[in-house]
Each structure stands twice: as C-alpha cells, then as structure tokens.
Amino acid sequence: MLERRARLAHGHLLAAEARVSDPVEVAQTIVAYHATDPATVYLAAAARTGYAPPSALDTALYDDRTLVRVLGMRRTMFVLPTDLWPAVHAACTEAIAVNERRQTLKMIAEGGITDDAGAWLANAGAGVLKALADRGEATTQQIAEDVPVLREQIVLARGKPYESKSTMGPRVLFQLAAEGRVIRTRPVKSWSSANRWALTEAWLPATALELPQPDAEEKLARAWLHAFGPGTLADFKWWTGWTISRARKVLAAVGAVGVDLDGGETGYVLPDDVHPVTEPEPWTAFLPSLDPAVMGWAMPGRDWYLDGSVKQQLYDRSGNIGPTVWWHGRVVGGWAQRADGTIAYRLFEDIGTGGAQLVADTAGRLEAWLGDIRVKPRFPTPIDKELSG
C-alpha cells in the first residue's frame, strides 16, 4: 500500500519534488485531465505545477493547440495531449460515435422532425461543416443562424418527470465531434462548458485520426499503466469503458506484468516499471472534483487511498467525487470555496501538527491563486454543501 501511494505521488506529479511547470507535461504524464467540469482541468493543472497561471493552460489549448478537449473513455470529456487524441479516438470514441448516431437518429424520428432521419442528419451535418468553413470558429447559436434546421425542437424523456425540450443544434454538433469532424475550441466565457466550434482539419491540420485500432489500444494501455499502474484488470476495464475480455487482451499485448497487491489482488505495471520507487517527502494537495488521481481506478478499488468510512461525505448520489484534501498519498479531507473566496476545508483525521500546517499553507496558496475566480463543483457533495455555506 505504501508503495502504491509513493507511485501515485510521483506518477501524478503531486509530491513537491515531482511537480513540473508545464500543464502539457502534466497531461502527458497523467494521460488526460478529466473535463466534465471545466474548472477541474485548471485546478488539476494548478496542483501539479506549483500553481502556474491559468493562462498557461489556455495557451496550450487555444494557441499552441498541444492540448485538445474531446470525448473519450466512458463517453466522458477529457483534455488530453493532441498527439494522444488519435489513439483515444480509435480505441474509444469511434465506437461511442456509432452508438450516439443510433441515438441521434432515434431522437429525430421520435421527435417528429421527419420520416427520413438519416437524410435529415446528413443535411444538417453538411450545413454545419459549411457554416464552420465560412465562419472559422463559431458558437452553437451562430451556427444555427446559418443552419436553421438546427433550431428544430424535440421533446426529451417524454412523459417522465424530467421531460424537457431541446433544439437539435447541440445534438448534431455533439455527433459531429464524436466522429472527429468538428472540435471544441475556445469557451464562450472563462472556465465554461459552453464553447465555440471549428472544423477539425482547420483547427488541427496536422492531426490525422486514422490510427489502426490495435495500435491505438496498445498506446492507450501503456499510457494508463504508466500513470495508474499497478492497477487491476477491473480498474483498466472500467477506465477504458471496454469489455473485460478486450481489456485483458490489450494488457497481454503490451506485456503488462502482474504484481501482488494488498488484499491478494493482482495489479499490472509496464515491463520496465517493476522496481520500487523512492518514498517522497510528506506532501499535501487540494485536488478538484473528478481529479485524475481519483478517477484512474474503479470503485471499490480505491480503498488504498480513500477510507470507506468517509466516502458518503465526498461523493454525490451518482458516485461523483468532489474536491479532496490529500496528505502523503491518502485522502484525508474535503474542501470548498466560499462566496467570499475563502478556501474552507475539513480534515477527517489527525495528521499531526506538521501535516496540518502544510495543509493550511496549501489552502492559502490555492485561495491566493484563485483570487476573484469562484469555483462551484458541477456535482455538489455533502461536504461541499457543508463547507461552502
């Protein structure tokens, strides 16, 4: 268990001596930033770069374009290195796009828009591509001005308590993005999930997505093992969203080596990663909701760094974990930002005077780094509600 915690400290750039200055290097090391909540990307990068300015991440995403925000494993949004995107697309997103197209066609047909859902979707998609070719970058609303059929409305979850209406614009763009034809670009406002769009070939002209699936699977497996090993077969299966047989086959293809874990399970590492790592100096970190350091392993396989007795305070009802306080490889508390900008936190255990002081110092650094920025997790948890006031 201590070995796994030491590996996490180094592999996820959380120990003080492991931190780097470049958010791109962070992504290359931890595979990807979880991006369901845009604030997570910035906070996860800050914790691993010694609080580099948010502009460094924006530069990588929107100027240098060495990072890209795309749909990936488990139909989840990630910010990942641009050169890893072809592997993620071939190994995960292509299959997701097929399933999503089936759902999109069903929405069109059941929404009463047309009797020929396939033709409607093809026409709408062609209109989006032309609009972006003419405009360059554009918001969903701007694209809908050029492609009026995107304003067609459908009823979602008809007859259910949460029934609602939606226009087809977001759904068509989601579909085209899953297929790799359009890409999410600059946000409409800072740290927002509302974004502009561009043609992939215009935004990333040198990026080709035609990677053979076996090569893509192996590249993704090596990246996961590098960041999250030792992890179990169940961990890898969950993280990728693959079947258990596919996950097992790919681990074998990359020569993953089995090692004994506490509790009698078998974990897997890369062939050249079997030696013990150096125990880091005591470290602390304030990590955001859905941080990669939490999301690399399946539940209930997180007990080696997260005591089960506190899970009910840190997770929402859907199983999304909120902001966490870490001490030397373990989750020891939760935190939240109050309306006045104060970082409030609560520790679940006594970590000693020295540990408590390091935690307090880190809270102060985070508070100063955020400044006038206010962060509200997309998935509020019990402790977030308690601390945020």
Image (spheres, grey):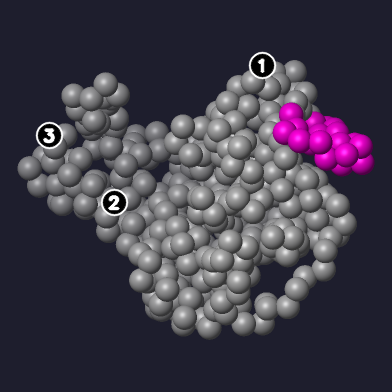
Q: Residue 197: horizontal and vertical position, in percent?
A: 46, 47
Residue depicted at x 70% and y 26%: 337
Question: Circle 1 — which element?
Answer: loop
Quarter of the picture holding the N terminus: bottom right
Place residue 201 in its image quadrant: bottom left
Q: Does dot 3 land on a helix, a strand or a loop?
A: loop
Q: Look at the image and say whether residue 289 sits in the magenta stretch.
A: no
Q: Report the Cα–Cα distance between label 2 and label 3.
A: 19 Å
Report which residue position mark 1 lands on.
389
Q: Nearer the viewer, mark 3 or mark 1?
A: 1
Is 387 left, or right, of 175 in this rendering? right
Of labels 3 and 1, earlier in sequence is 3
As drawn, the residue found furthest toward the front would be 264
Q: Is residue 140 above or below residue 385?
A: below
Locate residue 10, reporting x and y percent: 75, 62
* Residue pictured at 29% horizontal, 51% vertical: 100
